Amino acid sequence: MGKDMRTRWICANKMSRWICDYGIGKSSNVASGNSTSASSNANEDVLADDSIELLCQSAIDFKKNNEKSINERRSGEILMLSGIVLNDSVHGVTFHSGYDFRCLLKRLTCQNLPDTQVGFFNLINMYFPTVYDIKHLMKFCNSLHGELTKLAELLEVESVGICHQAGSNTLLTTCMFRKLKNNFFSGSLKKYASVL
């Protein structure tokens, strides 16, 4: 783990409260998720000044989220009861979401994250046995590149709702996964699973 990654890891473990706006959509046996994450006080977030600005421009109201959001433990309980985690028959779909999983794992375990990447990925594989990361799948598709909105444009998938919000991005991710699967892959995608 590089020094920068290690520093971010430590910061994430020390944060007492982390707002995590995650959208989860279920379609057949595919669950798609995206999250928008920032500390409860956007002015004190040491990890992502650019992201905070982008989210504010996308109508994320950090003050309201801080006042009305459910706490970490309760959000973890709801996620555990949803049937999405610890379920081999649910296939997760995400877009470049290592940090999103950090947020989800903190809620599910109510503990600090493991000190190593191996420990982190072991937890991901336990809670989310099959995950497809579109950013990884793009490596096997000629001419596809870019972030979420650029890929949607290339695949001619229309975004619904406000960009950079979890619900809208979740729907977009699900639609893009289906389009990638149908247009660029034949047969099972299993060999591309669980790489973030």
Image (cartoon, rainbow, N blue to C red):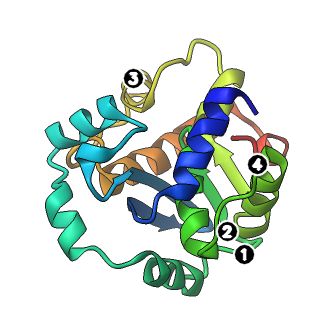
* Observer able to see residue 34: yes
Q: Which mark is residue 194?
A: 4
Cα–Cα span, label 2 and label 3: 27 Å
Q: Secondary structure at mark 3?
A: helix
Element marked by disc 1: loop
Mark 3 is on which residue type?
Answer: Lys
Find disc 1 in the rendering and name its residue. Answer: 87
Amino acid at dot 4: Ser
Q: Amino acid at mark 2?
A: Val
CA separation in Å, label 2 and label 1: 6 Å
Q: Residue furthest top?
A: 143
Q: Nearer the viewer, mark 4 or mark 3?
A: 4
The answer to whether the residue labelled 2 contacts the one labelled 1, judged by CB atoms less than 8 Å apart, is: yes
Marks 2 and 3 close (CB-CB < 8 Å):
no
Mark 2 sits on what residue? Answer: 90
* Of 77 and 38, the residue lying toward us: 38
Q: Are marks 4 and 3 in contact (CB under 8 Å)?
A: no
Q: Which residue is mark 3?
A: 150
Label located before the other in sequence (1 or 3): 1
Residue 137 in the image: x percent, y percent?
67, 32
